[in-house]
Amino acid sequence: MSAPSSETRAIALLALAAFVSASAFRICDPMLPQLAAEFDTTTGQAARAVTAFAVAYGVLQMFFGPLGDRYGKYRVVSVATLACALGSAGAVMARSLDVLVFFRVLSGAAGAGIVPLSMAWIGDNVPYERRQATLARFLTGTILGMSAGQLVSGLFADTVGWRWAFAALVCGYLIVGLLLLAEVRRQRAAGLGRVDPGAARLSFVAQARLVLGTPWARVVLATVFIEGLLVFGVLAFAPAYLHERFGISLTAAGALVAVYAVGGLAYTVVAGPLLKRLGERGLAIAGGLVLGVAFLSYLLGPVWAWSLLASALAGFGYYLLHATLQTNATQMVPSARGTAVAWFASCLFMGQAAGVALAGALLDRVGAAALFGGSALLLPILGMGFARALRGRTAVAA
């Protein structure tokens, strides 16, 4: 974009859209016990509201890249944001778990285009030397949104009812969506945001085949899938676990898990120095180890206050590992970068969906302690495994 103020405004609006979208992703976590009670089912079954959103979000991301190339990334983000308002409005009026799940699918499908296309738009419009810092600032919207979704959801669930949490989402999506549309008009009037005719003709199938046919891409995609499964599949049940174990309110439980955002924000502050000191392989190993300690703290903490440390460590450790994966995702297939990043994002959220489904099925059989213990054991192994893969790739390149 030509003017710094125009660029700043456009990116700030994208960050707001990411904030609301991330809030929707985590909004069901603290209300699972209340959903189970209202719809006369188990917490594991109520978790379908989480799984449905994540599945739709994960699958549809890979299709939004071609849409953004054909119709304009910013324009598609604005339409997707408004479509999310419809899905959330349906959730407000849901009278059965199946209806709620249906509208969560709609919201997840529409929301799938917001973050990937926002990042792609930043990549198109921000010079490389400023891109990493810009993406870090954009990332704060996602981190804070995940935290806000859990906190506000727990607050509404404990006071006026869970439906009001979705009503708040409707308002957020409508406001941000209309602001994004206004920005699209400003860009069009300034002659910006034009679609590249060549990019619009690219074959989705051919690009997907290129990505999936690249061995290193398969390593990165498999790793991020497992990461999503082990981290978010279990973390989705953390508020309910704390609520049941320590007898605290859903508001308090959601707030405790929301401290995850503090760890994520801490990462954005120290990412540069840590990368220089540890390198990519060191960050991957450290991320896995910190995540292991975080889930052990959830499991073994004798009082609820330990979950403050656990949540902060979970956020910090996750971004240590995930940022390393994300950096490699942007370079794993340079000739099809947009499709590659879309597949990366899709695999992350499909991993989360699989994790929530698996954890929900196991929760009623083995209990939450086994879930947290499993993640505490496997996440350090995942980090070390990816670090080893990085070392092998570096050796081959040399």
Image: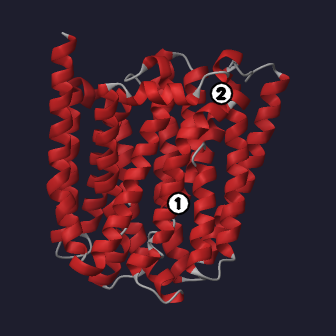
Indicate the quadrant where residue 8 lies.
Answer: top right
Residue at 70% from the left image edge and 28% from the top image edge: 70
N-terminal label among 2 and 1: 1
Residue 142 image offset from top left, x and y in percent: 50, 47
Q: Up-down: is 200 above or below 135? A: above
Amino acid marked by disc 2: Asp
SS of the residue under disc 1: helix
Residue 348's label in the rendered image is: none
Picture layout, residue 280 above or below residue 155: above
Q: Position of residue 379 (x, y in %)?
A: 20, 50
Q: Quickly name the residue at label 1.
A: 53
Q: Is residue 199 left or right of residue 321?
A: right
Which quadrant would residue 367 be assigned to in this image? bottom left
User: Contact, CB < 8 Å: mark 2 with mark 1?
Assistant: no
Residue at which label 2 appears: 69
* Label 1 crowd (10 A; few <14 / some 14-19 / many >=20): many
Where does residue 131 sit, x and y in percent of width and height?
A: 49, 23
Q: Is residue 49 above or below residue 5?
A: below
| Mark 2 and mark 1: Cα distance apart in space | 25 Å
- Name the kind of residue labelled 1 in the image: Phe
